Amino acid sequence: MTEFAVQIEGLRYVYQPQGIAALDGIDLAVQRGEFVGIIGENGAGKTTLLKNMVGLLRPTSGKVWIDGLDASQQAVSNLATHVGFVLQNPDQQLFAQTVEEEIAFGPRNLKLDKQEIRGRVEDAIAATGLEAFRSEFPPALPKGERAKVVIASVLAMRPETVILDEPTTGQDYKGCHQIMQIAYHLHRAGHTVLVVTHDMALIAEYAQRTVVLHEGRVLLDDTTAAVFAQPELLQRTHVTPPQITRLARALPRKLALPPTALTVAELGRSIVESPKQK
Amino acid sequence: MQEPLIAFRQVSYRYPRTRHYALKRLEFGIRRGEFVAILGENGAGKSTLCQMLNGVIPHTRGGRMRGRVLVDGLDTRQGEVAQLAQKVGIVLDDPETQLFTTSVLNEVAFGPENLGIEPDEILRRARWALDVVRLGGYEDHPPSALSGGQKQRLAIAAALAMMPDILVLDEATSQLDPVGTVEVLSIVQKLNHNQAMTIIMATDKGEQVARFCDRVLVLHRGELLAEGTPRQVFADQDLLARITIRSPQVSQLAAYLQRHGRPLPEFPITLDEARRGIEQIVGDQPET
């Protein structure tokens, strides 16, 4: 088994008939068990990159390997057992009459036996906290729960890697954190997680590594702290570090507070522990 | 006293085939030239409120409405949606629901064309609006070929090209990159300052609310739970304990420091205010 969940070499993708190169030479390797944030301006190629990973788009040139498998040689249905894709808008992925049926749909298509399907559905419901909604009609659920149903459906395929494309769009603050907590627990359980979002506070809080795209290329690829320490470069792709990181950076060095603080709690703790002004 | 531009008078509303009210006895006014944020959790009634401003509720949604919504003196129940559309521009969170033409330029020109504006002026407005949202150069692209965030920009441009008296942004920057969000809101702020365009923005981006808005209305389960300046709302820890809204991170930091016995001298809502406060409470570290 390869150590890489995702390997990409020289990936180009050109949308036809406009001839727009959305991806223009992407090299990227994600090890098993990483939690990676992907950021960049609107139109930088983030969603196109994800779609190439899950087989919804096929590279114009270059290679994508998922779990060591050449993605271009795999059916989308087979890739779905290796990499799960949660779309930006949950409503594009819901169609069954009940939450349980929605989650069971994927495993049923793998021709698994009933007991295995049952087990997968139960595990997915538990992982996403949907116990109270199992018999509900998915489109009638609140948006936060609809997003969880989609995540549960993806988990029931038992993919090694879970990809979330703007999972928090349209979610309120509570909903955002509930979804990111699910991603966090998946990561803790050993899954590889890739998240695309414009919410830099969430990236700072959850992603260990961040890949920055700009005009179809990788502009930066480093630890999240190292990425947010380069605001001038990020500006090029219309990204600004989270407000708390910008504040930490704006404080005078003589206060000896961490200039790359990524979260409110991190900066807060250092201030609480710092000497008082005389 | 001057009559407010928008007035909600004991407004309650429930959607068809539902029993509970999405909005309950709302009573407030918005003056011409205000920049107002609507905050609240999912399901609080923010989008419902927005759709009442251009008459989509109750005209096309049906349901049961009580009370009156007055927009520039016009009772929205009496006015037609088309009539209200000349005063009120609305941008929804999901641009897919608003885009329908075959090119980016046509999309932006469609609204002004329907107002009977001269072709030269339509073109001037369309190019201006596309530049504002960084879609200059995309005029001939089909909207379907744009990325999610670019589609949202296009929907905003289409509303701006109408130059409405009242602009309603219902989570309209949710898919924009951080710099794009500030760019669009800065333009909106300019229209607000220079042309007294009234702006109503449902959002959960606390940092932008603190930076751009004069006043905040907080909705909770269809009721108006609180209203005030951004500072009053983000500093109200009792309120924030009752509902989860995203205050600016610097305000979250101030609350953290308050809880941990190192309060800042004044409650900050902007980065500069927080920086000044921290400099006042943290002593210099000796050089090592």
Image (spheres, coloured by chain):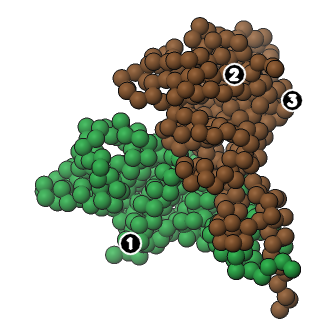
Q: Which chain is brown?
A: B
- The mark closer to the camera, 3 or 1, is 3
Q: Which residue is rendered at x = 35% and y = 48% of the image?
A: A149
* Front-most of residues A19 and A3: A3
- Left or right of B164? Residue B141 is left
Q: Which chain is green?
A: A
Question: Label 3 belongs to which residue?
Answer: B194
- Left or right of B75? Residue A14 is left
Q: Which mark is residue B6?
A: 2
Mark closer to the chain start, 3 or 2: 2
* Front-most of residues A271 and A167: A271
Residue B200 image offset from top left, x and y in percent: 68, 32
**Rendered-image quadrant of the N terminus of chain B:** top right
Q: Callout 1: helix, strand or loop?
A: loop
Tell me the quarter of the picture where residue B154 sits.
Answer: top right
Q: Callout 3: helix, strand or loop?
A: helix
User: Is residue A84 shown above or below B8?
Assistant: below
Question: Label 1 belongs to which residue?
Answer: A190
* Front-most of residues A6 and A101: A101
**Residue type (three-letter) at the residue carrying disc 3:** Asn
User: Is residue B99 shown above or below A105?
Assistant: above
Residue B160 image offset from top left, x and y in percent: 72, 27
